């Protein structure tokens, strides 16, 4: 017994080391696969068009770093104006989604009736329908019938409508598992109305999952190209992803400037994600504990 114990511990220790090594290699390979496209864009954004076409995977910066790519991209895409357009659309859409979906989820969880059941089923069903199936009718109705295209409020309205379903579904699961009814009952006894109970008691408890929903929607709205391209056409109201298209000519494209424009487009959202990373992880864990 005593002779076998060290051997068993040694075998167990070797197995753990081997398992940790395998997990580390898998994580490293996954990280490389995910980061490779971004690193290639970053690399080629500092190269001239000739060097990109000649060898896009090399670190050959013949003639030095092409920092002028960023200068040309910043100027030609009118970065400040496009950034303000993207910021306005993304921030307002996200705020509307967070407020409306959290209130709707709270109502559906706390009211167990047929209406809540029907609405919940409709929310789940709506997530199954792909956006591509609605593109043509959407443009036809809002364009030819209502004539409300080429307006930022229209894009904000559409972003909010298409994103409420998933956000409500996420909020529902969190409220069921993490928000005790006793707190609301105590607030009611103290004289709080429905709205005050929600905004002063319930909504602060939703903070972890709210961070997750915020970053998911911000990523979607900021990087979206398809829906804004259907709604917006005026240069004055184009978002950042749409402005990158100005670098594509009829017979050629400025590859280095395009790569620089893409980096400038994703940089703000990358900073936001890194700033909210801890809160995002905390929200995901909190919603999955129970």
Image (cartoon, rainbow, N blue to C red):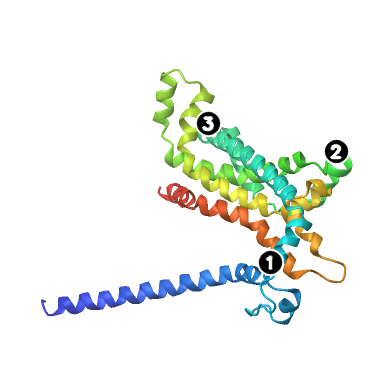
Q: Is residue 134 visible?
A: no
Q: Nearer the viewer, mark 3 or mark 2?
A: 2
Q: Is residue 221 visible?
A: yes
Name the residue located 75 percent from the left edge and 78 percent from the top edge.
50
- Residue under numbered circle 2: 146
Counting labels gives 3
Most extreme residue toward the bottom is 54
**For marks 1 and 3 on the same chain, the one whose residue lies earlier in the sequence:** 1
- Say the numbered circle drawn on residue 111: 3
Cα distance in 3D space between marks 1 and 3:
59 Å
Q: Is residue 77 above or below residue 198?
A: below
Cα distance in 3D space between marks 2 and 1:
46 Å
Name the residue located 58 percent from the left edge and 44 percent from the top edge.
167
Cα distance in 3D space between marks 3 and 2:
36 Å
Per the image, label 3 sits on a secondary structure element best described as loop
Marks 1/3 in contact by CB < 8 Å: the verdict is no
Q: Is residue 142 left or right of residue 210?
A: right
Q: Residues within 10 Å of mark 1 (few under 14, many from 20)?
A: some
Depth check, front residue: 116 or 141: 141
Q: Is residue 104 above or below residue 54?
A: above
- Residue under numbered circle 1: 67
> On the image, which quarter does residue 195 sit in?
top right
**For marks 2 and 1 on the same chain, the one whose residue lies earlier in the sequence:** 1
């Amino acid at each position: 017994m005593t002779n076998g114990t060290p051997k068993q511990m040694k075998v167990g220790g070797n197995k753990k080391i081997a398992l940790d090594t395998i997990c580390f290699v898998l994580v490293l390979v996954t990280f490389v696969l995910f980061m490779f496209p971004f690193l290639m864009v970053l690399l080629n954004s500092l190269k001239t068009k000739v060097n990109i076409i000649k060898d896009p995977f090399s670190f050959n910066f013949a003639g030095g770093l092409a920092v002028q790519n960023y200068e040309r991209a910043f100027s030609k895409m009118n970065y400040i104006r496009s950034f303000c357009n993207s910021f306005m659309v993304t921030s307002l859409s996200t705020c509307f989604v967070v407020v409306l979906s959290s209130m709707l989820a709270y109502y559906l969880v706390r009211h167990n009736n047929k209406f809540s059941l029907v609405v919940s089923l409709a929310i789940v069903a709506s997530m199954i329908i792909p956006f591509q199936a609605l593109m043509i009718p959407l443009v036809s109705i809002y364009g030819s019938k209502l004539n409300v295209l080429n307006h930022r409020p229209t894009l904000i309205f559409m972003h909010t409508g298409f994103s409420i379903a998933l956000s409500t579904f996420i909020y529902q699961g969190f409220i069921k598992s993490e928000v005790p009814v006793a707190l609301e009952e105590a607030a009611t006894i103290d004289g709080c109305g429905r709205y005050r109970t929600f905004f002063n008691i319930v909504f602060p408890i939703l903070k972890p999952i709210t961070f997750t929903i915020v970053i998911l929607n911000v990523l979607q709205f900021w990087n979206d190209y398809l829906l804004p391209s259907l709604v917006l056409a005026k240069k004055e109201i184009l978002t950042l992803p749409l402005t990158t298209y100005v670098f594509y000519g009829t017979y050629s494209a400025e590859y280095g400037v395009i790569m620089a424009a893409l980096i400038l487009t994703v940089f703000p959202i990358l900073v936001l994600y890194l700033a909210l990373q801890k809160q995002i992880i905390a929200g995901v864990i909190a919603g999955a504990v129970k």
